[in-house]
Amino acid sequence: GAGVSQSPSNKVTEKGKDVELRCDPISGHTALYWYRQSLGQGLEFLIYFQGNSAPDKSGLPSDRFSAERTGGSVSTLTIQRTQQEDSAVYLCASSLDAYLAKNIQYFGAGTRLSVL
Amino acid sequence: AQSVAQPEDQVNVAEGNPLTVKCTYSVSGNPYLFWYVQYPNRGLQFLLKYITGDNLVKGSYGFEAEFNKSQTSFHLKKPSALVSDSALYFCAVRAYGGATNKLIFGTGTLLAVQP
């Protein structure tokens, strides 16, 4: 596609429910990144994929968070048993690959998650 | 550890005046630096980057940034501000070490341009 696409744009859920957030990267981009933007924590890295592999999961805040990528394209971020502190905007980005520092990360519009 | 600091939460400037949004960094090794802009309810848009070469980097929408190694700074500048430049600006540095290509972001600076 023309840009990074994320869905849904907004998600309201009840505490304890599971949610899935989807990211469709720019066509041809092999690297995909998830970040979280919240008032208290700013912009923080969660996980990135090179192809279908996730070399760095260091930013996932707890074992309730997981992500996968299939076919080297679409990625899903899953949050189990959501808590109110999970409320944030989840941003996805993609780049040509994860090896060259000069490669620009292009961001989607994000999914705003609200946990009631 | 790598880090980025944006010392100003907000910068106010009158339309037509020059603007500067400050950023300092701390990295081991050569820094790879980026500026992004975020408009309300939108994702981050890439403005410019410094990888190597000239210290003055030109980017989108008339923005430029000056890399200063001795001061470990990468300030964003524009000669003449527009009301439409009002947005949230983020400085970022590429993390080093390990199997990662993640970006480390500053806390953001809200730019408000008054007509």
Image (cartoon, rainbow, N blue to C red):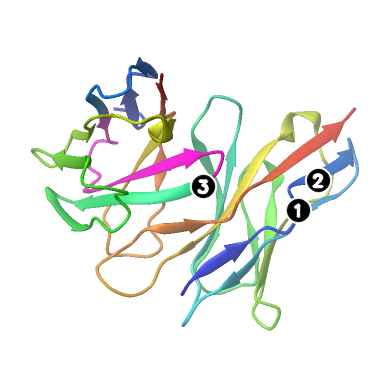
Chain letter for mark 2: B
Residue type at mark 2 is: Val
Magenta span = A22-40
Residue A25 painted magenta: yes
- In the image, residue A57 above or below residue A36: below
Q: Is residue B30 visible?
A: yes
Image quadrant where residue B64 sits: bottom right
A54 displayed left or right of A7: left
Residue at 27% over, 36% down: A25
Q: Is residue A89 visible?
A: no
Tag 3 residue = A41
Q: Secondary structure at mark 3?
A: loop
Q: Secondary structure at mark 2?
A: strand
Quick check: do tags 3 and 2 share a chain?
Answer: no
Residue type at mark 3 is: Gln
Q: CA distance from mark 3 to mark 2?
A: 21 Å
Chain letter for mark 3: A
Q: B100 and B18: which one is in front? A: B100
Tag 1 residue = B8
Camera-side mark, 3 or 1: 3
Tag 2 residue = B11
